[in-house]
Amino acid sequence: MASVTYDHVTKCFGDVIAVNDMTLDIPDKEFLVLVGPSGCGKTTALRLLAGLEEVTSGIIKIGDRVVNDVAPKDRDIAMVFQSYALYPHMSVYDNMAFGLKLRKMPKREIDRRVKEAAEILGIQELLDRKPRQLSGGQRQRVALGRAIVREPQVFLMDEPLSNLDAKLRVQTRAEISKLHQRLQATFIYVTHDQTEAMTMGTRIAVMKDGVLQQVDTPQNLYDYPGNMFVAGFIGSPAMNFFETTLSGTVEEMYAEGPGFKVRVPADKTHALRDYLGKRVIFGIRPEDIHDAEYAPPGITAETITAKVDVTELMGSEVFVYLLTDAKTFIGRFDPRTSARVGKTIDAVFNMAKTHFFDPNTERAIR
Amino acid sequence: MNWRKFFYRAHGDSPFKRLIIHLILIGACVIAVYPILRIFTISIRPGDRLLSTDLRIIPKDATLNSYRLVLFGDPVTKRKSDFFLWLWNSLVITLTTATIGVILSASAAYAFSRFRFPGRGPGLIFLLTTQMIPAGMLLLPLYIMLSRLKLINNYLGLVIAYSVTSVPFSIWILKGYFDTIPLDLEEAALIDGTSRLGAFYRIILPLSTPSLAIAFLFNFMSGWSEYLVARVVLQKANMYTWPLGLWTFAGQFTLAAGRFAAASIMIALPAMALFLYSSKWLVSGLTLGGVKG
């Protein structure tokens, strides 16, 4: 097993910079999720590690070994592709045994490993079939099996669940997490789905436009996003942002936004003192906006009035789209709420959970 | 037969339209089959009657004598048969052409399909333009080149001459097919432990059998029935391919029409068998190149 290091890695395709000066240490046995919107460079970062792309500048290490000029086959990695990439002309057994045969492993050992992996994944009865005779979920398992039998130092997964239906995705998600615990190997997992990232990762690395934005545990990323992009990308529905102006004094600071004025809690005013009288971006997650009637007790509440634009009942909660001065934002309300379309209601901000960002750098102000 | 049902069966076309389609198809069939039937008839007529007023396919006095003469020689004139020699020469040349052609074009097509190198686009266009030059125009330069290389009266000379014309086309067919094979498969193989060449050999080639079969057949056929280039390159009678051999039946003033026809029919059989055997691949291979997914 091994750690992985990206040291100031840059990858250019012509004039396009796909990965820009990426530095990241992934300790042994970690499940790291690379997440970001399409085209953010996360897949390129993974392919650089796999050796399928050449690094333009910087160093990539697996363990203590610099692998920049090492062929993919000698990097001791296994990769699961989005398209599964099963060899269509080989049976499931041969697909899984392919890498081992190439390494001239004894037949008995190959057989043992393939059967063991098939048992872990519950595909023993599929070993004689061809990939085209399998369902999407089964193919996915075979692709995982092909990676497992190799017993590599690092597992690379490139959006392995995106071709599965919603139910199977949730199920396989849990299985991959279990697999990680069982194999105790380093996993690097690429996805654009922040739910996958949040549920699976030991740590999450958020990327945008080839630049690593923030690397942290899911909870920290959620609670302390480093910039507006991370704040908006992690969490569903996304965080609400308002352009506000800070007024008052350090002791009694207010954020004035479109159609509301709320008091900034005392523990945040110190960091914001340089912004008094200036514009800042005020961010609050939908679950920190409540119907005034059902607001949980003990929160630092600031009440604002807003008009209900749309409501979406999700069963255990209601997503309420609210309007204040033509600015739309979303609240995650208790289903008992009396909010109805067209009605004006009192909504409560939980001020302890608010975030402030510099409007120019978009960085969090803390 | 329920004619109404027959005419309405496919696509719901009107009976009139279907009638026209069938008339055209029947006409095309007659045009295609008539000469072959004619040759067959000549081959089983006694003597060398090329022209006859008899329109029957199998004449009253049908005989296989011409076939016997072609296969075993003429006992009267004691002239030995060269038929199997011609067949052997043709097979050696065309099979070598096809094999070398497939190997060359598969590796070239892989490079054109997978790598981006300077001159790739112009190279592909250039290969295509070679197909637009008629064989007759190539004859003289080809002859001069082969004679300077001392490859006249040499099987290799003919193999090279045939490959020159068939390899570019095969490259296009194979490139089109390789383009449809997802890159992921090779990348998976690279990570699994093959080299680039290994991925080509173990993954791409096994997946490309239909198109390889097409390329092989095309290369084979382009040499099998070729006369003009063979006539120029091969001048020794014992090296003749069968199209050249057939012409030995034609003297200055006579034509052994029966033997000529019988030999033609027998020569066509291996090619027909090959076509029938591979027809499934041929059809799937020809369409597969164009269909992604």
Image (cartoon, rainbow, N blue to C red):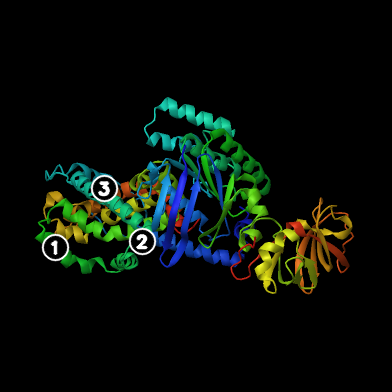
Q: Chain of mark 2?
A: B
Task: Decide: few, some or many residues near mark 2? Use Cα within 10 Å; few <14, some 14-19, many ≥20.
Answer: few
Residue matched to label 3: B95
Q: Find out whether the residues at labels 3 and 2 contact each other: C-beta distance under 8 Å.
A: no
Whole-Å distance between the Cαs marked 2 and 1?
A: 32 Å
Considering only vertical position in the picture, is A302 above or below A45? below
Residue matched to label 2: B116
Q: Find out whether the residues at labels 2 and 1 contact each other: C-beta distance under 8 Å.
A: no
Q: The residue under label 1 is which amino acid type?
A: Met
Query: Dot 1: what SS?
Result: helix
The location of residue B90, given as percent across then percent down, is 22, 49
Residue matched to label 1: B145
Q: Chain of mark 1?
A: B
Q: Quadrant of residue A256?
A: bottom right
Q: Is residue A262 left or right of residue A52?
A: right
Tag 1 or tag 2, which sits nearer the N-term?
Answer: 2
Q: Quadrant of residue A16?
A: bottom left
Q: Is residue B78 left or right of residue A133?
A: left
Q: The residue under label 3 is which amino acid type?
A: Leu
Mark in front: 3 vs 1: 1
